[in-house]
Amino acid sequence: MPGLWELLIMKEQDRNIYRDNDTAEYAEILKQTSAMNCGNNPASNKPKSSKGYKYKVIIKPIQEALYGRELKTVVIPSAPDALADRLELLLASKSAGNTGLRNEIVSICDELLRQNHFIKKLSHI
């Protein structure tokens, strides 16, 4: 039981204290409580993440073992008006400080370019 307690409460776990069976019990607790889901919401498909030691060393490997490695897919509409509306929203969100939008912005610009709604300008850097 000291190993499970170590996993539950410590920010940086001592590998000499917990065992594989403690990790399995901890994984079951995380799964049953939806603690690995964003907002602890059981309906959420978005995994919770962190840059902390406990997440990287303990929780992320448990997530990957239970759910596999998650691929992030950006699905965008094909209608030019819908693309332009979404792009406007993303750019406003980005200027407000939201990060992590680059892939979707680039995808929308690529699609608008492909549909000939953008004219690509070459600039010399």
Image: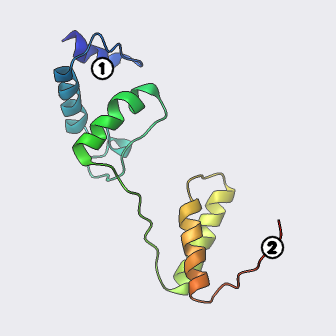
Give the amino acid at mark 1.
Leu
Tell which of 78 and 44 is nearer to you. 78
Q: How is the image coloured?
A: rainbow
- Residue 20 image-quadrant placement: top left
Give the amino acid at mark 2.
Ser
Give the labeled residue for mark 2: 123
Q: Secondary structure at mark 1?
A: helix
- Say whether residue 34 is left or right of residue 110: left
- Say whether residue 56 is left or right of residue 20: right
Gap between marks 1 and 2 measured at Cα: 53 Å
Tell which of 50 and 14 is nearer to you. 14
Residue visible at 24% across and 41% down in the picture: 65
Rendered location of residue 16, percent (x, y): 29, 10
Q: What is the crowding at mark 1: few (fewer than 14 residues within 10 Å), some, or many (at least 20)? A: many
Q: Which quarter of the figure is the C terminus placed in?
A: bottom right
Rendered location of residue 93, percent (x, y): 62, 59
Tell which of 108 and 88 is nearer to you. 108
Residue visible at 23% across and 25% down in the picture: 23
Give the labeled residue for mark 1: 7
